[in-house]
Image: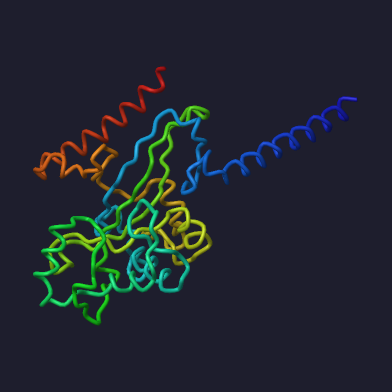
Amino acid sequence: MYKISFVFLLASFFQLTGGYAQIAKNDAANKELYNPQSTNPVRKDDIMFKKSLWFRMDLRTKVNAPLFANNNEISRLLVDAVKKDIIKPYKNDSLSTAMTKEEFLSRLRIPMADNVDDDIEWENENPWGDSSDEAVELGPDEYLPRQLYVLEMKEDMIFDKRESRMKHDILALTIVIPADQTPTGIDKVLASFSYKELVNSLFKNNPNAIWFNPQNAGAHMNLADAFTLRLPDGMLVKYENPRDNRIVDLYGDSKRSLIEAQNAVMQLMEYEALLWEY
């Protein structure tokens, strides 16, 4: 009798949980309930706290070197994937405006030195905006992967009240052409990418999408797993604010900006810790 009841209950449990899983799967496709760009979507009604954060990663640093191993640079991986039509580039990390492949390849080309003055004037009038390469003569050469050593990550810090825990939901990665690689001496956005698309279309089951393990060549980690474990390290350069300013724009002095960025990170950690007291 007990065996029959146990089997019945077990079957009912799997039927019930399977039904819940199907409901969750169907709900996840509803843009009104979830963020469609999220890899681990949280129902909007379950969000108790959310703040968008931007981190700048220098891939030349020791901690980020596994992202930038020779011939396995993440910048090489992303550029090659665009060229092969595996992923779509976007003009910025809002992911609202797609970039054509032709425009991406145009941005990837190094401007001619004799057009520096015109480019500087445009950049001064449009800081961090969409560049207009039509006014700048481009050379035949492209930026090499080793020259593209700056990556920016946009993520949402979310407290899921249903699961009672804080989540870090990566939304976009942006390749930035660093200032010392541009004729103008100003950072320039190459392209942004949907992190969800990167995970599903590029990272998973890709032997070239690796977090390089210098201690054990047989234990390289997939990039999706590395980002989930928060192994890449970056400095906070922007947090959600009414004017959409970067921290350096808010505080000016680079030293003070660094201090304020560190303070912002500490305040968010403190807020997360205090949530457990409620």
Compared with 207, 276 (above or below) is: above
Residue found 47% across the figure and 57% down from its top: 197
Estimate the x, y position of residue 12 in percent, counting from the top left: 78, 33
Return the x and y of residue 128 as percentages of the image width and height: 22, 55
Q: Residue furthest bottom?
A: 140
Residue 60 x %, y %: 24, 59
Q: Quadrant of the C terminus?
A: top left
The answer to whether residue 262 is above or below residue 213 is above
Left or right of 164, for residue 150? left
Camera-side residue of 238 and 242: 242
In the image, residue 41 above or below residue 202? above
Residue in the picture at 40% in, 30% down = 49
Label tally: 0
| Scheme of image coloration | rainbow
The residue nearer to you, when weighing 265 against 158, is 158
In this orientation, which residue lies closer to the viewer: 245 or 69? 245
Residue 191: image quadrant is: bottom left
- Which quadrant holds residue 139? bottom left
Residue at (36%, 51%) from the top-left corner?
94
Q: Is residue 140 left or right of residue 208?
A: left
* Picture coordinates of residue 240, whole percent (x, y): 29, 39
Residue placed farthest to the top in the image? 278
- Quick one: which residue is furthest to the right in this view? 1
Image position of 199 with respect to 44: above or below: below
Q: Quadrant of the N terminus?
A: top right
Residue at screen point 26% across, 75% down: 109
